[in-house]
Image (cartoon, rainbow, N blue to C red):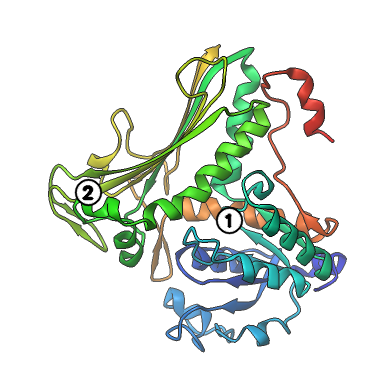
Amino acid sequence: MQNATRARKDGYNVMVWGPGGLGSVAIWEIQQSQAFKLVGVRAYSDAKNGRDVSTLFGMRPSGLKMTTDVSQLLKKDADVILHTGRDLGTFNTDDEICQLLASGFNVITPLPYQNASLFRDRKFLAKLDAACKKGRAVFHATGIDPDVVSERVVPALTSMCTHIDSLKLQENWDSTYTPRELLEIVGFGKPPREAAKSPAAAMISTNFLHAIARSMEQVLGVTYSRLEETHDFIAATRRIHSIYIDIPRGATGRVTHRLRGYVEGKGRRPFFTIEYNWVIGDEMLPEGVNPGEKWIATIEGRPSLRMVVNLRASHKNSKRSYKIGSMSTEPGYHGTIGPCLQAIPLVCNAKPGVLPSFGPGLHWMQDARAILNLRK
């Protein structure tokens, strides 16, 4: 790894692992900043192996080629690796991330490792810790959600409350720009009953749901008496024509994932609910949700609060995407990469180990004295 002090002056050397939709946005944003220098890109397909990274955006060659040769990339002088590989919900990225850490590279990822100690098994946690120690490296998981919305913004909102009965966080993700392959894997375009038979949709969402729910449990100082997880496939009421897929009337046009956490003494209703809605077409948004309302947080308590995060490409017009070269990108991807880039200087100057979320500051807790435990 490069010396962090030198990197602050010359720009941090960064590699990107996985130049898919999210990874391509990471590559683009790195190249727009003087604070960072892209020094390597790990491809996962033969189609991208050996291609100049600038061809992702239909631009002139930059001289930096993507590669599937990990051994060559591990010889690079890099301060940090942004791991944006595809998460399949099967812990498929565990071994690779640990390999990178053990090889001496700091790793930042938006994949669902947020507060992994709260929902992953001890064997993996020990492996992650050992990898950080061996490589004297830092591991940090962040992103727009989990982390920024679920562990910084929403908990900060609770600081106005003296009492909370329930909290619901609803995410409405526009899947228009999601590749067709992934859309079909999670059930879009299939009859709801058929889509429900495939475990893929649930597997991909489960780790994100649990990362958020367990983080909220810790932050708010409650203990769940039970968790309830559901996955629903909602039929389109009319034919939907999208960029990568056409959805017939009656086929799956929205996939809704929920995890509810119940707390004794809080009644029969869940204390905390995290709900993901993957949607194609504004008409498939849940009832009461308007286009562009990416996150809705609803708190019942004293006082009761409702916050809407309206995420758009621009508030000046109706554009729903950015054009970076020849590629169209969704604003949520840029919002996911932003926290990863902002964390690079802190990760590169942290002590080896797992660097947790930076948190919201003061907020509501079931017992206000418990805030001292979070500050340790």
Taking 269 as reference, is 157 left or right? Answer: right
Decide: is 9 above or below 148: below
- Residue closer to the observer: 349 or 38: 349
Residue type for callout 1: Pro
Position of the C terminus by quadrant:
top right
Image location of residue 218, percent across then percent down = 67, 33
Q: Quadrant of residue 289?
A: top left
- Residue closer to the observer: 23 or 27: 23
The secondary structure type at the circle numbered 2 is helix
Image location of residue 160, percent across then percent down = 63, 17
Image location of residue 265, percent across then percent down = 57, 14
The secondary structure type at the circle numbered 1 is loop
Label at residue 192: 2
Taking 290 as reference, is 127 left or right? Answer: right
Mark 1: give few (<14), some (14-19) or many (20+) Cα within 10 Å: many
Tally of marks? 2
Q: Quadrant of residue 101?
A: bottom right
Circle 1 sits on which residue?
110
Decide: is 162 above or below 339: above
Position of the N terminus by quadrant:
bottom right
Residue type for callout 2: Pro
Residue at horizontal 85%, vertical 56%?
A: 351
Which of pointers 1 and 2 lies earlier in the amino acid sequence?
Answer: 1
Residue at horizontal 33%, vertical 67%?
A: 181
Mark 2: give few (<14), some (14-19) or many (20+) Cα within 10 Å: many
Please say if the residues under marks 1 and 2 sit with CB atoms less than 8 Å apart: no
- Residue closer to the observer: 217 or 284: 217
Residue at horizontal 77%, vertical 24%?
A: 370
Residue at horizontal 57%, vertical 78%?
A: 42
